[in-house]
Image (cartoon, helix red, strand yellow):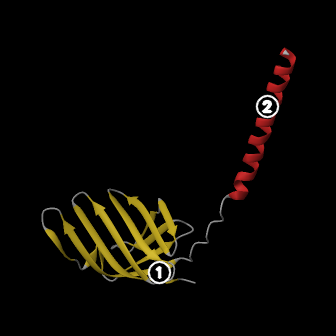
Amino acid sequence: MHRFTIAALALACMSGTMLAQEAKTETPAQQPATEALPTPADCTLTKAQLCKADGGCAESASLGDLALPARVLVHYTDRVIASTSADGLPHVSTVDTLSSVGDNLTLQGVDGLTGWIVQTSKSEDGVSFTVVSHEVVLTAFGTCQATH
């Protein structure tokens, strides 16, 4: 009887291991395919609102150091947003999070002491770009066009 119990236990352990290996093998095949990201977009921001904790909100003629209209390149697959700084040098910010749900695309990142979020669409050309820092929020609106 003791041998039968040991044999049954060994068989159960081997079966469990085999099932676990089968489950591990099947898991990648069961995951849904990810959607292709859009081609890079050339975005032009034309309107902005600047809000300060101690001063309310007002229309802004600039996006930080950049006068409006300001242009920004959004490269989805390389996960970067690029622009030209006020002194003419390139400025690149890394996209930390990119979320694609249905038609919507949301990108988030941190650049120095500021956080930012870009909200856009795969089928419509509208875009919003919000930058936040301590006690200041700047939101800009515009349009994006595919570069290819």
- Percent position (x, y) of residue 24? 73, 46
Q: Quadrant of residue 54?
A: bottom left
Q: Is residue 3 above or below residue 122?
A: above
- Residue 65 seen by the camera: no
Q: Is residue 22 left or right of residue 141?
A: right
Location of residue 110 in the rendering, given as x and y in whole percent from the top left corner: 39, 58
Q: Is residue 74 visible?
A: yes
Which residue is more in the foreground, 66 or 29? 29
Front-lying residue, 104 or 148: 104
Q: Earlier in the sequence, mark 2 or mark 1?
A: 2
Residue underneath mark 2: 12
Mark 1 highlights which residue?
Answer: 42
- Disc 2 to disc 1, C-alpha distance: 60 Å
Residue 62 lies in quadrant: bottom left
Left or right side of 141 for 123: right
Type of the residue with mark 1: Asp
The residue under the point 40% across, 70% down is 118
